[in-house]
Amino acid sequence: MPKGYWVSAYRTISDPEKLAAYDKLAGPAVEAGGGRLLAALGNRVVAHDAGIAERTILIEFDSFEQAVAAHESAAYQEALAALSDGVERDFRIVEGTD
């Protein structure tokens, strides 16, 4: 079964306090949903083409369905509410290859 991934690239961070509140809630929500952080804060980013060398997060789940369910969970929705309009980001859930 193909794995699922959350890929999140932050274009701008307008409210660091909202982002900090989100981080505090999102980490435990992701772990509870079975997610494993593969790349995160402090890691180096080299952007090409129209990319932006900003905060980029990569989280792995055992399946695409698990990744979708974790995003829809009450715990992660609470984290999103805390984030609100504090950032502009490109967030995707993608299915891996076998």
Image: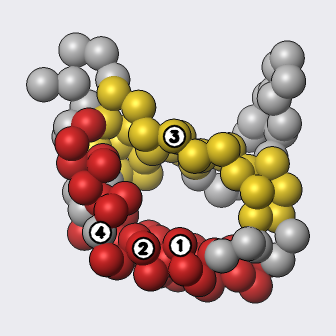
Is the residue 43 above or below the residue 1 in the image? Answer: below
The disc at residue 73 is: 4
Q: Is residue 1 left or right of residue 73?
A: left
Is the residue 69 above or below the residue 78 in the image? Answer: above
Label 1 to label 2, Cα distance in Å? 5 Å
Which residue occupies 22% across, 14% down? Answer: 98
Whether tag 1 and tag 2 are in contact, CB under 8 A, the answer is: yes
Q: 94 or 42: which is nearer to us?
A: 94
User: What is the three-letter code of the residue carrying label 1?
Assistant: Leu
Answer yes or no: is residue 82 visible.
yes
Label 1 to label 3, Cα distance in Å? 14 Å
Which comes sooner in the sequence, label 1 or label 3? 1
Label 4 to label 3, Cα distance in Å? 16 Å
Q: Which residue is mark 3?
A: 92
Q: Position of residue 48 (x, y in %)?
A: 83, 19
Whether tag 3 and tag 2 are in contact, CB under 8 A, the answer is: no
The disc at residue 80 is: 1
Q: Position of residue 69 (x, y in %)?
A: 25, 55
User: What is the three-letter code of the residue carrying label 2?
Assistant: Gln
Q: Identify the element where label 3 is drawn.
A: strand
Q: Which residue is mark 2?
A: 77
Q: Decide: few, some or many residues near mark 2? Use Cα within 10 Å; few <14, some 14-19, many ≥20.
A: some
Q: Is residue 35 left or right of residue 63?
A: right
Label 4 to label 1, Cα distance in Å? 11 Å
Whether tag 2 and tag 4 are in contact, CB under 8 A, the answer is: yes
Q: Identify the element where label 4 is drawn.
A: loop
Occupied quadrant, residue 63: top left
Is the residue 88 above or below the residue 9 in the image? Answer: below
Occupied quadrant, residue 41: bottom right
Q: 85 or 2: which is nearer to us?
A: 85
